[in-house]
Every structure is written in structure tokens, then in C-alpha cells.
Image: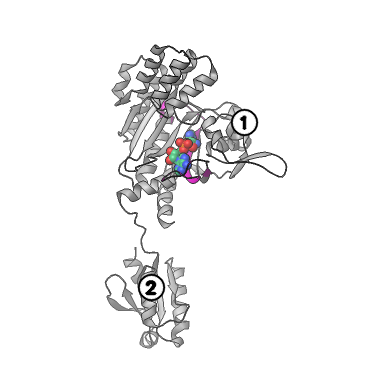
Amino acid sequence: MAKRRKVEQAMRDACARFGFGEVVTPTFEHSELFTLRSGQGIIDEMYVFKDKGDREMALRPEITASVMRYYVNELSTAPKPLKLYYVGNCFRYENPQSGRYREFWQIGAELIGTKTPETDAEVIALAVNCIRAAGLENYVVRVGHIGILKSLVREEIKDEALAAEVLRMLDKEDFDAMGDMFDAKTLPRSLFEKITAIADIKGGIDELNNLEDSEATRHLRETFNVLKLYGIEECQVDLGIVRGLDYYTGMVFEIDAPRLSAEKQILGGGSYTLSELFGGEPVFSTGFAIGIDRVVLASEAENPIQTGAPLDAYIIPAKDDMRKYAFGIVARLRSQGLKADVDLMQRSMSKNLKYASSVGARFAVIVGREEMEKRSVTVRDMKTGEQSLVSADNIGTAVKKNSG
Ligand code: HAM
């Protein structure tokens, strides 16, 4: 948990630096909240149950829909843009494997109220800053635009269910199955080739030159220009990004950690509209969610996450009549903000030193008779074994200076 918390806190701090405020939403909701537009993929994976009032409820598979419901119910008159972030557990009935769990944790952000390229760049910049703050060095940011493929597929394939199926296959990059389906449904081969050619546009921003100029390509170019101003140059274009969730309307993006052998996707996001489904005015939003479990796995695969000593000082009274003095010392260290603990089991000196070492205390603070009489303590560095006599008034400073 110390490692996870460190990663999570670094990403929370990044959200705060970008002016995002935290919100918390319920763990379970009416299942309809997620079935309205999240798509078949999510519906198949949801934990759904009836409550005592015979209402159909679901454990949240994601948090965006809940944030938008919260926005419609409570925040629609708040000044825009609204910048909200959240950390929470999500539930999906998937086949568990490394990095894919039935309960997992997300940190996510939603910027509500605008749809400019600057908005999208701001959200991508926050996402990249979260990943950098988490300490990850190897990651790939891919940015696309769902409008291009979605409008082509929906224009050319009038059967809605079939169009949705094609988009789902594109998300899974299952081109063989898609080809078979085109044949089975006698859809034109030329359309298949057009779709796969667009999905294949990947690389630098100049790859967009292979495509007719459109609102979507102009939007992406401008987003990349703003990202450059933010000092973010690592993004690639990928027009094959379709996203498993159905609510996206414009820019979409994903971040992968290539070091992970399976389940490499650590982040997904994009721009969407959802508020009108929950009874609100339509409002444009852009957001993302990061899989915290996967970020921790990816960071650990690069370098073990350092969390510092769990305890700054462990106080050891040498004899029973020094215990009262020892409790005064531990209270003083704690009041100075240090992580301090004291022997509660009246163990021998050697057993206490062993314990201090096993719990990862940075210092052992030994209180003997002589120390007590001089109103001092012996501070033992648990890494080097060095010992020094420190006055009781200065012990906090001595420990603080060297801890961490
Ligand atoms: P998502 O791509 O479904 O997007 O999930 C975001 C991230 O959650 C994934 O990239 C992955 O890292 C992590 N994740 C998903 N499923 C699992 C799992 N079973 N086990 C471990 N980690 C998992 C969303 O949820 C959208 N709400 C993102 C968003 C926010 N779009 C706009 N705003």
C-alpha cells in the first residue's frame, strides 16, 4: 500500500497543480446510468444486482458517467470550465489475469464545459503529467479522433447494430473477423479497405497529410500545437483508436506502458457528451482515467518504487524504570511530525534492536540510565550502526536531519 499510495499521491498532486478539484461519487448506481451509452462491452462486464426495493443497481465499471450525473444534479450552474478529478475502485466482470482485475482502481479527471483544441491539450497534458509524476519513464501516448471512423462507419452502414459491431471489432483491432463479417453481410470490400487504411494512420502529426482536410484533422493539428507549448512532444497520432466505451465524440487518446507484458493500456480518455442523457443541457467534456494498478506494475517493472523508511525512530528503554522517560520521548517526536514508535512488549535490548531493524526503523533511540540522568538519548543509525549521544531537546532535529 505504501508504494501504491506514493504513486496515487503523486498523480493527485499533478491534478491539483492543473487546478482540478476532487469529487467522490457512490460505489454503486442505478445500472441504467452505465447502460445508456457506455456500450455493449461495458454492459456485458457489469456487476448488476437487485436491491431490496427491486431496483436494478450496478457496481460502477467506471466513474465518468457518475461524475456527469453529479454535474447534472448538483453542479450545472457552477462556473465553467469545471475541472474535477476522482480516485475510486471500479468493478468489471472480466477474465482476471495480470493487470486485469474484477476490482481495480482508477484516478481520472473530467474537464466540463468546452470542446476547444486547447481543452483537449490541457487534458492530455494533465494525463502525461500524472504518468511522469508517477515516475514512469517508458510510455507511449497515442492520440486520435473518433469522429473520422465513427462518421464513416455510421454513414456507410445504416444497420446500427452492425455499425456498432464494426466499431467494436476496430477497438479490438480484430481485422480478420471484421473482414469475414464484411463478406458474410456482403458489405463492400472498398469500405473495408477505406476503414482499415484510416485505422492504420499512425505516427507523427504529418501522417494526417494522408487524409482529406476536415474539422477533425484541423482539431488534432491544433491540439498537437498547444501540447508543444506545454512541452509535451511525445504524442503520436493513431487514428485506429476506437475506445471500448461508446460515449466519445471527438478526440480520443490512450497511453500504453510497453514494459507490461499483458494489459499494457494504462490510460484511456477523450472528449464526449453525456449530460443530456441524464436530463441536463448538452455540455462538452474531455477526460481520462488511469488504471492505478497497472501504473504501479509498470513502475515496479522499471525500478522498484522507493517509499522511504516506514518509521523514523523506534524508542527502546534499556530497563523498566526508563519506560516513563521513553514514552515522553516518543510523544515529543510524534508531536514534531516524525513517525515514531516505542517498545510495548518490554523486550530485551537485543530483541528490540532486531525488531527495529525488521520493521524498517531508520533510527533506534536508546534510553539507558546514564542517558536519562543527562536528559539525553543514544541515537543509533540502523543503516550504519553508528551511535551518538543527543540531548533530549535536540533529538527531533537529529532524527529529522538524517531520516528519509
Ligand atoms: P477505460 O479505458 O475503460 O476508460 O479505463 C481506463 C483505464 O482503467 C484503462 O486504461 C486501464 O488502465 C484501467 N482498467 C480498465 N479495466 C481494468 C481492469 N479490469 N483491471 C485493471 N485496470 C483496468 C474509462 O474508464 C473512461 N471512464 C475514461 C474516461 C474518463 N473517458 C473520459 N473520461
Give the x, y percent position of residue 326. Answer: 44, 80
Residue 311 in percent (x, y) is at 40, 67
Which residue, given by chain and number where applicable, does mark 2 sit on?
356
Marks 1/2 in contact by CB < 8 Å: the verdict is no
Q: The magenta stretch spans which residues?
A: 90-119
The image quarter containing residue 40 is top right
- Rendered image coloring scheme: one colour
Q: Residue at x 30, y 48 (%)?
A: 302
Q: Nearer the viewer, residue 366 or 103?
A: 103
How many residues crowd around disc 2 within 10 Å: few (fewer than 14), some, or many (20 or more)? many
Residue type at mark 1 is: Phe
Q: Nearer the viewer, residue 236 or 402?
A: 236
Instruction: State the quadrant of the C terminus.
Output: bottom left
Query: Circle 1 sits on which residue?
Result: 278
Question: Splitting the image into 4 quarters, where does residue 379 fall?
Answer: bottom left
Q: Nearer the viewer, mark 1 or mark 2?
A: 2
Let me know if residue 364 appears in the view: yes
Quarter of the rendering occupied by the N terminus: bottom left
Measured from the top left, where is residue 127 in percent x and y?
A: 40, 38
Give the CA separation, mark 1 to mark 2.
56 Å
Is residue 110 visible from the viewing direction of this image? no
Report helix, strand or loop for mark 2: helix
Give the number of the disc on residue 36: none
Task: Tell which of 74 and 98 is nearer to you.
Answer: 98
